[in-house]
Image (tube, helix red, strand yellow):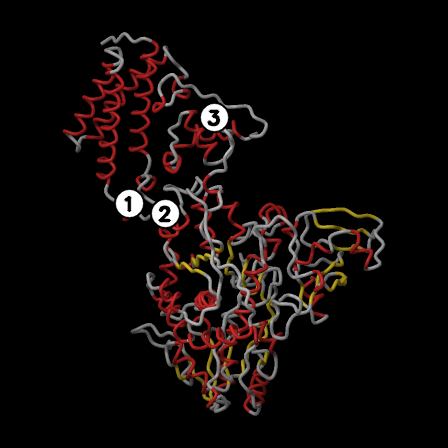
Amino acid sequence: MHVALRPRSGCLVLCLCLSVFTLLLQTLWVPLETTLEEPAGRSPEERGQRGLGLRRLALRLEALSTQVQRLSGGRGGAARPGGDDLSRMLRSFRLDQRGLTRSVEKQLRRVSQRLEQLSRLSRTASHDLRPHAGPEEKCEVPADRAYPLCAEKVEFLRARWHTDPCYAFYGVDGTTCSILTYLSLTEDFCPLRLGGNHSVPPWRRKPHSDPGKAEVRTSLSPLYEVISSSSGPAVDFIRSRVGRMSERWTRAALRMRQSSNETFPTQMRVLLYPGALAGSVGRRFEALVDRGGPLGELVQWADLGACLTILGHNLTFSTSRRLLHSLIGAAPGRGSCPIQRPLTFDLIYTDYHGLAHLHGAMGMAFPHYQCRFRILDSFGTEPAFNLRSYARSRGYETLWGSWGLQPLQYLTMFPHTPDNSFLGFVSEEAAREDSYRKERIAVIYGKQDYMWQGKSEYVKAISDEMETHATVYQPPGLASNLPGFIRNHGLLTQERFVQLLRRAKVFVGLGFPYEGPAPIEAIALGCVFLQPRLHPPHSADNNDFYKGKPTSRKVSSQHPYAEEFIGKPHVWTVDVTNRTDVREAARAILLTQVKPFTPPEFTCEGMLERLRGYIAHQNFCSKSAPTWPPESALRMHLGPLGQSCVSVCRRSSLVCEPALFHHLNGPAAFARLSIGCSSMGREANHLFPSYSPWGRHCALQQEPLLFSCAGSDPSHRRLCPCRAHLPGQVALCPDCL
């Protein structure tokens, strides 16, 4: 059948046929999870039945058919044959949905033949027409020096717009006009059309809000409300810990109210999102909670929530990835597009898993808002591992690093990495009436069988001196692998575990887990912590646990903080391969009277004071150099060859403060130290600023993200920004508050 078409009519039919063709291809070959109604990352069981997609196709084609009939009716009979064919095709779909696939293939062949006939009449119309604006409208990519990436982005979207449904959500349909509209209004890569004034994309606008004042609360009721909508063993643990410690938080809040002045900071809108509890990773984590799995991170999340609540901030809590998308206004799809509106949270506390979830949902809005993120990171992230380009070129790239945040945005469990911010937690406390009533009991620190491997002689030497107890998870129906002289209580609740520690004289480390909260809590309950010395020190070079972690630390004992910041008589570190040393240490501990001890930074007051300082003074969204801690806190030191600034400052009973590095990054700093530089240059290197005696070369830092307290080299003397700290509060200096 031959159909005579005028060029203008041919363009209309060509566009309509191409729309049908593209629509069919999307529905048949794009997986269902990429449709607008389906979020990314869902399992096959959650993707629904294929028939749902077919029904959607029929409905969408029906709507297109109505548009075809309306448009072709307005043009007389010229384009009606194409519209009639499409209507017959749709009726066929509705009558026989089971044979839809075969029908689609047949109609695709017919559309292909028609396209060959029409392509001779118009070869460029498909890119230059917008169906909703009429066939006459044409769009050309502007050549504007203010938008140098516009043409490149247009070409990218022409080829890739169909790979993520978020583009269609924002109105992209493959035409140049729709792409330019999207790139000008949503992504800000192209100028506005028709000479319109430039406007900020919606997600970059400041939301209209009237924040209140953060007044100190004496109740944790708001926290109970926000976590009540979540469930599972991990959240139950968080809820239980908050309830058990609520009286202590209330007492600390009352003391803070009495000592604080009448000025109140701005109330922050805060999102708590433990990404490790979301999705498939969360299900695996949850399964371990009741089987002796790690609970240290949950302790931190519970105490962080309580601390922010007492400080008067407005909290939202979620362990759902779907809810996260809703809370941040993510567009439906795979995360290639920016969020739909300005981020309504002033701060988002999450972890490395949650950081990846945010990155996968925010598109280009992620770097714009990443200054608001705070990452709970137990073992720390050093600057050399944090900047992707540098890490890749220097061999520091790992699984967890390379996010390019300010290193102080990472929050650690202990103050072992001065380049990060020390968040910490709140330790248990001894009951006053029976603090010193200790029995001849040792409790072994290790809740799973594998932690005991190779430690039988060490544990036997201790059991020769005192009754030895364990709290190892015992799977139902399986025989215990523990030595017969061990009294195993099985996995205990936190309340019963605390009761056991109140009776015990010694809390015995097996070498793993590293740097957990339990030893600090045991010391606070009047126990002595006996731990193995690790020789050689464990690090990513010789230990599987540390491999892949973004740190170069070398851990010389199971709990370096306990060894270095607390020490004897509360902490004893021994060579576990020497039974004589172990037995003598156990006997000496039994003869030592030890009072319960809690470092001030692990009390409710200490954590409240620290976090209040961070929220008030750490502004990572500012483009200017940091002003906190103040310059008056700076103590400048030139270290010896081969030492990091962590070691240089600690040697003088100070701590390295990375926020003060910018005061040292210039010729004046070398002059103050009477260093004569024969040459001076800038380079991106995590060891700079530094001085090299060979050639008397003074090196300055070119990349502020690489200012690093960590890192050493035999050919460099590090220029180090040290500062003093409050007694028992490493994170704060005397001039900081």
- The residue beneath circle 3 is 193
Q: Residues within 10 Å of mark 3 (few under 14, many from 20)?
A: some
Q: What's the mark number on residue 47?
A: 1
- Identify the element where label 2 is drawn: loop
Mark closer to the chain start, 2 or 3: 2
Nearer to us in this view, 343 or 521: 343
Q: Where does the image place residue 709, in percent across and percent down from the top left?
A: 66, 60
Q: Is residue 95 left or right of residue 392?
A: left
The Cα atoms of the two marked residues, 1 and 2, are separated by 10 Å
Tell me which label, 1 or 2, sits earlier in the chain.
2
User: What is the number of the mark on residue 160?
Assistant: none
Q: Are marks 3 and 1 in contact (CB under 8 Å)?
A: no
Locate residue 304 relative to residue 632 in the image: left or right.
Answer: left
Provide the residue designation for mark 2. Answer: 41
Kind of residue at badge 2: Gly
Q: Name the quadrant containing residue 83.
A: top left
